[in-house]
Image (cartoon, rainbow, N blue to C red):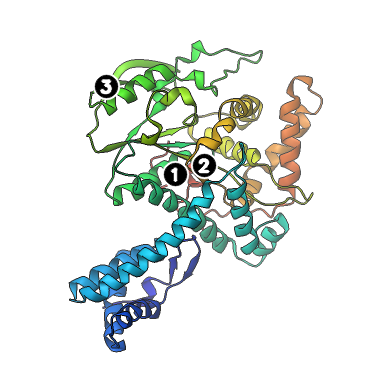
Amino acid sequence: MNNPLLLTHVFKRDGTLVPHSRQRIANAIYRAAVAIGGRDKEKADDLASTVEAIVCANYSNQHPPMVEQIQDIVEKVLIEEGHAAVAKQFILYRATQDEKRKAKLSKSKVHTGNIPYQKIYEVLVWASDHNLNSIEKLNYRIAKGEFEEICRESDSAYESDIQAAAELISERKEKTRIVVVAGPSSSGKTTTTRKLAQYLSQKGMGMVELNVDHYFFDLEMHPIDEFGDHDFETPQALDLALINKHIKQLLSGEEVLIPKYDFKTGTRALEKIPMKIKPTDVILIDSLHGLYSEMLDGIDTDDIFKVYIETLLQMKGSNGKFIRWTDLRLMRRMIRDEQHRAYDPGQTLTHWHYVRNAELRNILPYINTADYIINGAVPYELPIMRSRLFEHFKKWELEYKDDPRRVDAYIRAKRVREMLESVTPVADESPISKTSHFREFIGGSVYDVH
């Protein structure tokens, strides 16, 4: 009935991918039975086989289950097979472990000023444990043929972060009316929002997304610099007053007509898309400026759960310095905008000073208002970027070297070129899961992210 080859690994709560073992399931059931005086190992083994059959019927090596999902199935099987007392003991054990885990999770929210030191430390520990805290070690693992394994490890760590945020939100589901996913450009907000919505929906929360990109003012209303470039990175590029008004109306049970923005023409049409939510629905907002105070001004802060995502890569380059998070996001945006917005990568580079200035003024100062921080960096993106963009950065470094108007672009091009030069390139992107948030940028995602 059950083919063990269908499932070889499962995700632990910390995101680590570990070998699947039916014996672990049997041991957990047996421990619960012993706690109430039972000693039937054979019955525990039979029940574990039933659990494993259900698990293998619903999951695979392409989509491995989390430990928590297997535990849910254990509870269900125990109850359905008439072992309610054992199920109760198993549930009590899980509750005890959950309390310990929540105490640990709460530390992830600790940050001083605008720098999430606790989260950064956790990411550094993870990188060290997985031999991915330097380009030299990354290259070593690639040389050993472990690129696919690096992808799995990195994605599971990110997935664990999403799940942790979902659990914290669900604990407040009786109060939470708005969930915001914020973060700087190309940090992975869109896929994170989709994944978070899936987890929360599984926990019985009705999620309705409000796409604030439709609230951009017409492009002609933005200032233009000497090169004809628009600064649309500022929060004032959005109609914040209208966003705020519509959110309040939605929370009051009213129907609103949200605008529709055409990115090809850079124009907005007002009152186009009707929207109304149920009293139990939660508004989900994915926004660059989701932490900016004016967007949610006047709304009870207890009604809002704020998630912040940043590419918190903790990896040193060949120069002994940590790789800059902004450089990762710059490369991501270059690839995404070229593929999906017909925007030349060189334009992304020369526009990036607007991005950074807006982040420093309007995003980073609000990190300390976030309820949970997610690491959106994955070490395997560097070998992919080396293959895709290295020659571009070599060209830009030479092109802007003596241009006094492009000093910012030259400095960034030189820095990224030097960093990528020491990375082993990987051209084969097939080991990257279709559910990876990195697919938001390179293409091939199963989510609607563009």
Whether residue 61 is situated above or below residue 329 in the rendered picture: below
Q: Residue at x 24, y 32 (%)?
A: 277
Q: CA distance from mark 2 to mark 1?
A: 8 Å
> Residue 128 appears in which quarter of the rendering?
bottom right
* Circle number at residue 88: none
Would you say the residues marked 2 and 1 are in contact, meaning their CB atoms lie under 8 Å apart? yes
Work out whether mark 2 precedes mark 1 in sequence or the reverse, and give the earlier one.
1
**Residue bearing mark 2:** 309
**x, y (%) of residue 307?**
46, 40
Q: Outermost residue, right direction? A: 402
Q: Residues within 10 Å of mark 2 (few under 14, many from 20)?
A: many
Q: Residues within 10 Å of mark 3 (few under 14, many from 20)?
A: some
Work out whether mark 1 precedes mark 3 in sequence or the reverse, and give the earlier one.
1
Whether residue 141 is situated above or below residue 159 in the rendered picture: below
**Residue bearing mark 3:** 256
Q: Amino acid at mark 2?
A: Ile
Relative horizontal placement of residue 81, taking residue 285 as reference (left or right): left
* Circle number at residue 192: 1
For label 1, the SS is: helix
Q: Amino acid at mark 1?
A: Thr
Work out whether mark 2 precedes mark 3 in sequence or the reverse, and give the earlier one.
3
**x, y (%) of residue 111?**
58, 43
Q: CA distance from mark 1 to mark 3?
A: 26 Å
Q: Residue at x 46, y 20 (%)?
A: 238
Relative horizontal placement of residue 2, taking residue 235 as reference (left or right): left
